[in-house]
Amino acid sequence: MGASGFPSLASHLTDRVVVTYDPRGVERSTRHDGEGELTPQVHAADVAAVIEAVLAEAPAGHPVDLFASSGGAVNALALVASRPDLVRTLVAHEPPLCTVLPDAEPALAAVEQLYATYRADGLGPAMTGFIVLSQHRGEVDGDVLASLPDPAAFWLPTTDDGSRGNALLGQNLRGICGHRPDVDALRAAATRVEVAVGAESAGELAHRAGEALAAALGSAPVVLPGGHGGFLGDEYGMVGEAEPFARRLREVLDRD
């Protein structure tokens, strides 16, 4: 998701200077390094460059408060592990880290299956599987992707156009879900790391991963309104709870 996913949330945070960006290969961010897979470390370096550019123009020049969701939360965790000097507070909302789950092995196998489906059959079948896996509640087993609905049920293409440039499925899926966060570095960082989960997404993979990561960091997860897309307005065809989400997010950011 790029900057176009955050106008509704930003509109309720007018007391702050809000900077959004498009990750490498997403929306306005054109890649010049091919269409290969990316890692959270690469994304983290990109985010660091954005923050450094912002701080260079900021009168105070102090570290930023950072909200990141889903794959962006994984990238932000990699950033804090490597450059904690740039971030004062990180709110990492529902990072889909399969590696921290008790069912890590079947969850990672499902991700590999999705990637293989994308390479072989294209966007429709793979994105259908991604939606099913993301919305599955409870531990993942070997049957989670065994019987998938028709892609048309999700308004997805039913024929393969041959393209393989989807940023989510082709470039970021395996790197994000397979990332192993540096828990020791995160715990040692001066950055205050708050892992957040959605009030309405209990049992889903990203919610469970958030709970597991918070436990590994020795904290309890912050609960934010809505589900995985709780911060959205009407962006991306999903309607979240942007105003109460922003209100609760502000409370978390303003905590000492």
Image (tube, rainbow, N blue to C red):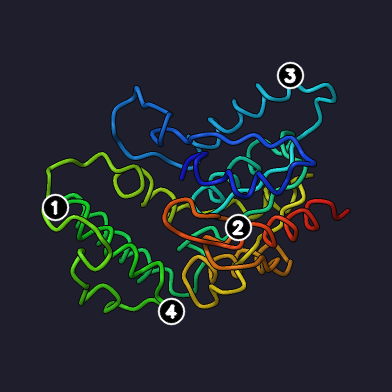
First in residue order: circle 1 vs circle 2: 2
The correct choice, above or below, for 150 with respect to 73 in the image is below
Q: Which residue is mark 3?
A: 57
Measured Cα–Cα span from mark 3 to mark 4: 46 Å
Give the x, y percent position of residue 222.
71, 66
Q: Residue at x 60, y 51 (%)?
A: 182
Q: Nearer the viewer, residue 246 or 32?
A: 246
At numbered mark 2, what does the secondary structure look like: helix, strand or loop? strand
Measured Cα–Cα span from mark 4 to mark 1: 27 Å
Q: Which residue is mark 4?
A: 139
Q: Residue at x 54, y 71 (%)?
A: 208
Nearer to us: label 1 or label 3: 3
Give the x, y percent position of residue 131.
34, 65
First in residue order: circle 2 vs circle 4: 2
The correct choice, above or below, for 189 with respect to 52 in the image is below
Nearer to us: label 3 or label 4: 3
Amino acid type of disc 3? Glu
First in residue order: circle 1 vs circle 3: 3
Amino acid type of disc 2? His
Splitting the image into 4 quarters, where does residue 142 fall? Answer: bottom left
Q: Which residue is mark 2?
A: 93
At numbered mark 4, what does the secondary structure look like: helix, strand or loop? loop
Give the x, y percent position of residue 204.
48, 73
Q: Nearer the viewer, residue 247 or 198?
A: 247
Which label is found at residue 120? 1
Q: Residue at x 69, y 37 (%)?
A: 18
Q: Are marks 3 and 4 in contact (CB under 8 Å)?
A: no
Q: Residue at x 26, y 72 (%)?
A: 145
Task: Give neighbour class at mark 4: few <14, some 14-19, many 20+ (Cα, 10 Å).
Answer: some
Q: Are marks 3 and 2 in contact (CB under 8 Å)?
A: no
Measured Cα–Cα span from mark 1 to mark 2: 31 Å
Measured Cα–Cα span from mark 2 to mark 4: 20 Å
